[in-house]
Image (spheres, grey):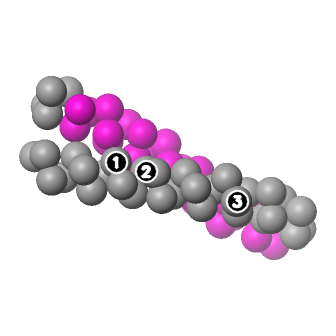
Amino acid sequence: MLILFQLALTALVVLSFALVIGAPVVLAGGNNAQPILYVGSSIWVALVLLVGVLNFFVV
């Protein structure tokens, strides 16, 4: 369970960095790439919830 928690947390951190850099670029680029931003944001929310649930089991 600890390894799954660490992998989910690592994925959350990597995706957060990607969204911090990628979101302004996507929003400045036009409307064609906005669905990518919505998918990335949805995955980020899912990872936050997953890390929260896994944290309950690890600690």
Per the model, the C-alpha gap separating discs 2 and 1 is 5 Å
Residue under pointer 1? 9
Label 1: few (<14), some (14–19) or many (≥20) C-alpha neighbours in 10 Å: some
Q: Residue at x 39, y 57 (%)?
A: 11
Dot 2 amino acid type: Leu
Dot 1 amino acid type: Leu
Point out the stretch of residues depicted in magenta.
32-55
Residue 37 position in % (x across, y down): 67, 59
Q: Is residue 9 visible?
A: yes
Q: Are marks 1 and 3 in contact (CB under 8 Å)?
A: no
Per the model, the C-alpha gap separating discs 1 and 3 is 19 Å
Q: Are marks 2 and 3 in contact (CB under 8 Å)?
A: no
The mark that comes first in sequence, 1 or 3, is 1
Residue under pointer 3? 21
Instruction: Assign a secondary structure to mark 3.
Output: helix
Residue 39 position in % (x across, y down): 58, 59
Left or right of 47? Residue 17 is right
Residue under pointer 2? 12
Q: Residue at x 80, y 57 (%)?
A: 24
Q: Is residue 38 visible?
A: no
Q: Residue at x 37, y 37 (%)?
A: 49
Q: Which of the 4 image quadrants contains residue 51?
A: top left
Residue 4 position in % (x across, y down): 18, 52
Label 3: few (<14), some (14–19) or many (≥20) C-alpha neighbours in 10 Å: few
Per the model, the C-alpha gap separating discs 2 and 3 is 14 Å
Residue 20 position in % (x across, y down): 67, 53
Dot 3 amino acid type: Ile
Instruction: Assign a secondary structure to mark 1.
Output: helix
Residue at the left extreme of this rendering? 1
The mark that comes first in sequence, 2 or 3, is 2
Q: Are marks 2 and 1 in contact (CB under 8 Å)?
A: yes
